[in-house]
Image: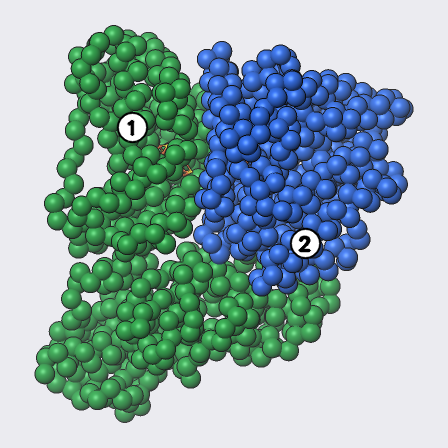
């Protein structure tokens, strides 16, 4: 048998099998996109780029694509022009699913049967065709999570399955295929392809189809406990559905985006763990402690700074410290403890770690994600707050709370410096300003400049040309603050955040940004005296819970 | 309008947006009416009559689209509109409205609104802008929404969301990639259904005679435009960067109206009067033009070094025969035979034919932000066109959102390309 690659659930795999092919789903991530971007463009669907990479590396000799989207059509065009594959076919899938569309798809299936049959030399055998239909694998009986949205890469799916305490099903393009076996009837090719076209079009529609009401069936399956909504970078289809779904579904939903390269485990693990914490599947008793101290500590190991908060067993603040993390999270944590006045590690009854480095702190007695800790700390500081905007050095996030302080939703920005502390730092360097100066300057502007670029690199060149045009640093800083505010406001709106608002993270110390964001939101932002400490405070409160639970 | 006035106006609109979308709408609508009147009564010096005439026609249409609810049908570029003209329903084209908005420097807040509501940043910015216009409350509800699956995915996504947003009926014409008789019949059948759909939405009866008349206008427009191109092959003319975008409106949304026919006729007559002489480097443009960008305008239109002779989007489907007695088949043919349908090979072949016929020296292939069907074929197009002897510049930019543009880099690339063309014999 010869292997033939395919990517879409509308691919007639039964027909290919009957004609001697062995269909394999092309769903792997690619290490890099040098070749594919060279033959297309960098603004191009990352899955499609990965397919091009696999073709280039010779893993694929035969390929059937479905005319799914602009990116797939162009992938086909490029492969066709290169002429390197042994067999290449583009199946033109209709956007409708009525009788006329079925007629069109039937014609396409006949065309494929003729071309692939001629290629393999295997004559069409109705019995082999009927035998090629396999029933779909059964869904788990108990609670499970499902990845929905744009196709999930094989590596990402494995990672999700490893990290999730519940089974994870794939309901995207590759994993959601269910062509019903054909009814008994005439066994000539024409009649069979007609019934086959109906069976293929009868699947739960994807976003590419015109009529998508049938997708509700995906979200109503029994046992489904939560949705992981996946989008692919430079794929447009699925963000639209996510936007509707997040307002309409009663299921907890986590949004992730991937670019079809192997995922760094860190951020994904954090998000998934926070999501699972939210599902209430894991009972929160993070700290298993043995020491008998007077105090508890929370330690927030971030990528730039490590922050620690110590509470006494009554919950009063005893001490806190902020140090630079440095290259190793564990060393940063030790430094932070050393910086505490009058507290020793031995005095701690429990230490809960949070932040990126939370897994690498040897003396921690428990771990909770920074999403949950930020929420806890913020709620403790200001119980009225319903939306927390946290802008740190490397990322920004928005967390929505209910009246009890429980997380109802959260979003994080993806892999992009725009709108983070890093962005401001880089711009400060361009303007030759210190961060504290920049914080004040943003308040004293006169001319309302707009920095329209969203990308850090473009923004930098915009700043340079504003300097060249003799605009004052105050006005430029104000423009930058507005850019950060607009990016952040978009995140707030994506999360569905409502007032009262609170801001945490290092950037909350920047008065100019706070003012610009207040203007954007049309509401005041409450900022604590030590806005960087709320994650560590939350972690300390969890540590306190664990001690109290034992008493 | 002078650039500062435009900026101030844009800021004025932006300020009204959050609290008073209806005021922003009135401001825009009045401005477009004003531009329309200006074009009709005091057309700018040096501008062809064909151009000012057309702007005098389109501006009030844009104003109308921002007027009362339920007056217009929202369509995409490739949707044949003869049925609408026969029924006296005004088509409204998002790219058209986007072009107007960016000319008034009022695009940014609308784009931000769309992004805040979950429209991906990597999405086509024409469509982002349209969604922003709709969801900010500035654009009133259309009567219905019509779209083809040609030429890109955005049509389906945006128009589906629009129909949901406004709760109005929607019709999609699915255009297959191939152009066999069965494919033609599939599309013609859908267009017939669309006729019935429109009768139902509007409560009007489709008059066969009027539809025939619309097709007669289309045929005349196409013929005059063909002749214009033949004339243009031997003549130079300094034009605004928006000229091709307006012709694109005339040859799509307005095709089937006497106004489009008059535009094409004027263009033919005025071009015939120009001296037979070629000046500067002649460029064929592929895809939309960033006509808002003054640096591009400076080089392409004012420098005298080059001219944009034509754009492959303007004339994409008009080489197909139009038979007024077979209106549905004629419209269907325009879709399936469009240069934008049937794969990159066809699009590039058509461009190559145009570049040869129009005596061009080079091609600019414009990758508008978020347009995957264009960007995906960029390298293929460049290689193919260059192999045929036409130096090609792949230019990344944005047709309507200044936020995605690195102006300095675009200027450098464009200038280097001109130097390359000028260095050739
Ligand atoms: S979006 Fe639909 S058509 Fe596209 S690959 Fe997925 S299942 Fe196939
Ligand atoms: S991920 Fe999206 S853009 Fe990419 S091939 Fe699939 S549907 Fe197309
Ligand atoms: S620019 Fe491209 S993506 Fe945008 S509407 Fe036009 S064809 Fe579609």
In depth, the one of A208 and B217 nearer the eye is: B217
Seen in the image, is B178 located left or right of residue A284?
right
Crowd tier of the residue under label 1, counting other residues whose Cα lies within 10 Å: few below 14, some 14–19, many 20 or above = some
Which is closer to the viewer, label 1 or label 2?
A: 2
Image x and y of residue A62, in percent: 34, 22
- Residue at position x 29%, y 25% from top? A200
In depth, the one of B26 and A476 nearer the eye is: B26
| Chain letter of the residue beneath label 1 in the structure image | A
Which chain appears green? A
Image x and y of residue A7, in percent: 33, 31
Residue tagged 1: A202
Residue tagged 2: B26
Which chain appears blue? B
For residue A546, above or below residue A415: below
Secondary structure under the numbered disc 2 in the rendered image: helix
Question: Which image quarter holds the C terminus of chain B?
Answer: top right
Q: Are marks 1 and 2 on the same chain?
A: no
Total labels drawn: 2
Marks 1 and 2 sit apart, C-alpha to C-alpha, by 47 Å
């Amino acid at each position: 048998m010869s292997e033939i690659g395919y990517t879409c659930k509308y691919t007639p795999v039964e027909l290919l099998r009957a004609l001697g092919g062995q269909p394999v789903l092309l769903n792997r991530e690619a290490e890099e996109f040098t070749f594919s971007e060279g033959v297309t463009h960098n603004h191009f669907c990352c899955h499609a780029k990965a397919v091009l990479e696999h073709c280039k590396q010779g893993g694929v000799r035969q390929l059937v694509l479905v005319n799914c989207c602009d990116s797939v059509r162009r992938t086909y065009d490029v492969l066709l022009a290169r002429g390197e594959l042994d067999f290449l076919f583009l199946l033109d899938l209709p956007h409708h699913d009525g009788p006329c569309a079925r007629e069109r798809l039937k014609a396409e299936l006949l065309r494929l049967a003729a071309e692939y049959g001629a290629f393999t030399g295997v004559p069409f055998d109705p019995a082999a065709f009927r035998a090629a239909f396999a029933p779909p694998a059964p869904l788990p009986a108990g609670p499970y999570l499902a990845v929905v949205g744009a196709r999930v890469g094989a590596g990402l799916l494995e990672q999700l399955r490893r990290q999730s305490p519940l089974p994870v099903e794939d309901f995207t393009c590759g994993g959601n295929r269910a062509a019903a076996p054909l009814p008994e009837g005439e066994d000539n090719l024409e009649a069979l392809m007609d019934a086959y076209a109906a069976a293929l079009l009868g699947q739960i529609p994807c976003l590419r189809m015109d009529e998508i009401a049938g997708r509700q069936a995906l979200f109503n399956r029994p046992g489904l406990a939560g949705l992981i909504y996946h989008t692919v970078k430079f794929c447009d289809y699925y963000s639209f559905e996510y936007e509707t779904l997040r307002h309409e579904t009663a299921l907890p939903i986590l949004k992730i985006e991937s670019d079809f390269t192997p995922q760094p485990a860190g951020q994904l693990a954090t998000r998934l763990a926070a999501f699972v914490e939210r599902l209430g599947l894991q009972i929160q008793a993070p700290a298993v402690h043995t020491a008998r101290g007077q105090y508890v500590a929370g330690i927030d190991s971030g990528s730039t700074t490590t922050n620690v908060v110590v509470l006494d067993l009554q919950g009063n603040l005893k001490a806190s410290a902020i140090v630079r993390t440095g290259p190793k999270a564990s060393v940063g944590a030790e430094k932070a403890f050393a910086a505490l006045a009058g507290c020793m590690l031995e005095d701690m009854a429990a230490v809960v770690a949070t932040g990126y480095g939370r897994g690498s702190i040897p003396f921690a007695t428990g771990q909770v994600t920074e999403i949950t800790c930020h929420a806890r700390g913020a709620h403790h500081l200001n119980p009225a707050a319903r939306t927390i905007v946290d802008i740190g050095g490397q990322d920004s996030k928005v967390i929505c709370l209910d009246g009890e302080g429980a997380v109802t939703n959260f979003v994080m920005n993806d892999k992009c410096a725009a709108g983070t502390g890093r962005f401001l730092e880089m711009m400060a360097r361009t303007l030759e300003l210190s961060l504290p100066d920049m914080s004040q300057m943003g308040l004293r502007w006169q001319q309302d400049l707009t920095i329209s670029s969203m990308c850090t690199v473009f923004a930098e060149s915009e700043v340079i040309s504003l300097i060249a045009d003799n605009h004052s640093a105050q006005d430029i800083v104000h423009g930058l603050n507005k850019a950060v505010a607009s990016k952040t406001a978009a995140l707030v709106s994506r999360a569905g955040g409502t007032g009262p608002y609170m801001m945490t993270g290092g950037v909350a110390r920047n008065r100019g940004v706070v003012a610009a964001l207040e203007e954007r939101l049309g509401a005041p932002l409450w900022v604590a005296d030590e806005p960087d400490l709320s994650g560590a405070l939350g972690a300390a409160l969890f540590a306190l819970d664990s001690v109290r639970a034992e008493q | 309008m002078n650039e500062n006035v435009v900026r101030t106006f844009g800021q004025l609109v932006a300020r009204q947006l959050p609290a008073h979308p209806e005021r922003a709408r009135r401001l825009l609508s009045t401005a477009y009416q004003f531009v329309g009147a200006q074009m009709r009564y005091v057309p700018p010096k040096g501008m062809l009559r064909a151009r000012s005439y057309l702007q005098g026609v389109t501006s009030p249409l844009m104003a109308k689209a921002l007027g009362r609810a339920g007056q217009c049908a929202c369509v995409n570029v490739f949707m044949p509109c003869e049925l609408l003209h026969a029924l006296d329903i005004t088509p409204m084209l998002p790219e058209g409205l986007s072009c107007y908005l960016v000319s008034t420097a009022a695009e940014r807040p609308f784009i931000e609104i769309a992004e805040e509501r979950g429209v991906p940043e990597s999405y086509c910015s024409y469509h982002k802008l349209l969604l922003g216009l709709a969801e900010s409350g500035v654009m009133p509800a259309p009567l219905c929404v019509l779209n083809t699956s040609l030429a890109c995915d955005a049509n389906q996504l945006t128009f589906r969301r629009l129909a949901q947003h406004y709760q109005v009926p929607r019709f999609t014409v699915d255009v297959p990639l191939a152009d066999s008789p069965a494919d033609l019949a599939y599309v013609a059948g859908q267009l017939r259904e669309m006729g019935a759909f429109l009768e139902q939405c509007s409560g009007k009866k489709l008059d066969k005679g009027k539809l025939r008349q619309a097709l007669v206008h289309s045929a005349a427009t196409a013929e005059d435009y063909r002749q214009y191109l033949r004339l243009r092959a031997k003549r130079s003319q300094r034009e605004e960067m928006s000229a091709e975008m307006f012709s694109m409106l005339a040859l799509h949304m307005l095709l089937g109206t006497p106004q489009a026919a008059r535009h094409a006729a004027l263009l033919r007559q005025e071009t015939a009067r120009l001296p037979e002489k070629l000046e500067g480097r002649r460029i064929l443009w592929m895809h939309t033009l960033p006509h808002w960008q003054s640096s591009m305008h400076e080089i392409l239109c004012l420098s005298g070094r080059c001219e944009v002779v034509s754009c492959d989007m303007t004339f994409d489907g008009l080489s197909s025969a139009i038979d007024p007695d077979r209106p549905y088949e004629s419209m269907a043919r325009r879709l399936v035979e469009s240069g934008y349908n049937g794969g990159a090979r066809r699009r590039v072949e058509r461009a190559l034919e145009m570049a040869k016929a129009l005596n061009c020296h080079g091609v600019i292939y414009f990758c508008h932000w978020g347009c995957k069907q264009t960007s995906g074929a960029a390298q293929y197009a460049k290689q193919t066109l260059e192999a045929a002897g036409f130096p090609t510049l792949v230019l990344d930019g944005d047709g309507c959102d200044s936020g995605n543009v690195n102006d300095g880099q675009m200027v450098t690339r464009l200038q280097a390309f001109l130097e390359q063309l000028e260095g050739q014999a």
